[in-house]
Amino acid sequence: MKIERPQAMLLDLDDTILAFEIVQAECWAKVLKEYSGGIGEGNLPRLEEQIRIGSKSFWSDSERHRVWRQKLDEARRLIVEEAFSNLGLNNRVLAQSIADRYSVVRDEAIYPLPGAIETLLKLRKMKIPLALVTNGSAAYQRRKIERFGIGQLFDEILIEGEQGFGKPDERIYRKALDSLGAEPAGTLMAGDNLLWDVIAPQKLGIRGIWVNSMNKKVMPSVEPFLTVGSLSDVMSFL
């Protein structure tokens, strides 16, 4: 299938251009091993499991997700403290140290997904207007954008923490369209989150491309315009 050249493209950042969730399990395992002396070797698997369960529960609530993704470091402290409490490990200082160390290790582990930046360069060469549309805090997202030098590849950068609203609020997509001078029907949105990058924009007439780099199961009621394994795969359809 070939896609007619779009008027514009909107792109997500985390797990679309940069590896973020993908490195999570590896980073927790590394950090907990570093603190095994204070935790106890026997407690490591149980603590790692409690953090995984607690994290999934914490972020499953959409309103809590909206608020706390602006304060990731603090959210991680809460999650680890609860995991400690569930195992009867009463050491708040150690729990917070682990959470803070994880934040550092997680940031260090972030990397550009294979072919992602090269794809942005190709899209720029095609003169397709591009907007980066990402949730999260302004400082945290800007730091990643600057670290990997991708800011200059976009005509517009819309960060939730700077705008005061983000995905799946329709205002963020409309602002991106207005800034690029594009119509919904002529625009593509590519990202890894089915709700934020496919369902919400498609309600406005934008065609959603699901970048399913982690092989997640698609919801039966959702029909992305296109599903790819990586952002670089999009080029074979243009």
Image: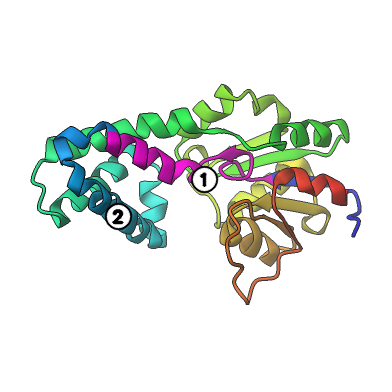
**Depth order, front residue of 169/38:** 38
Residue drawn 20% across and 42% down?
A: 41
Relative image position of residue 168 (x, y in whole percent): 55, 57
Relative image position of residue 233 (x, y in whole percent): 77, 48
**Real-space Cα separation, disc 1 to disc 2, in angstroms:** 17 Å
**Depth order, front residue of 11/32:** 32
Relative image position of residue 138 (x, y in whole percent): 47, 34
Residue drawn 69% across and 52% down?
A: 229
Q: Is residue 21 magenta?
A: yes
Relative image position of residue 37 (x, y in whole percent): 17, 33
Highlighted magenta segment, given as a residue range: 11-33
On residue 22, the disc is 1
Q: Is residue 213 above or below residue 112?
A: below
Crowding around mark 2 (Cα neighbors within 10 Å: few <14, some 14 to 19, many 20+) is few
Q: Is residue 217 magenta?
A: no
Residue drawn 79% across and 38% down?
A: 129
Q: Is residue 71 visible?
A: no
Q: Is residue 45 above or below residue 73?
A: below
- In the picture of the structure, the residue carrying the numbered disc 2 is 49
Kind of residue sitting beneath label 1: Ile
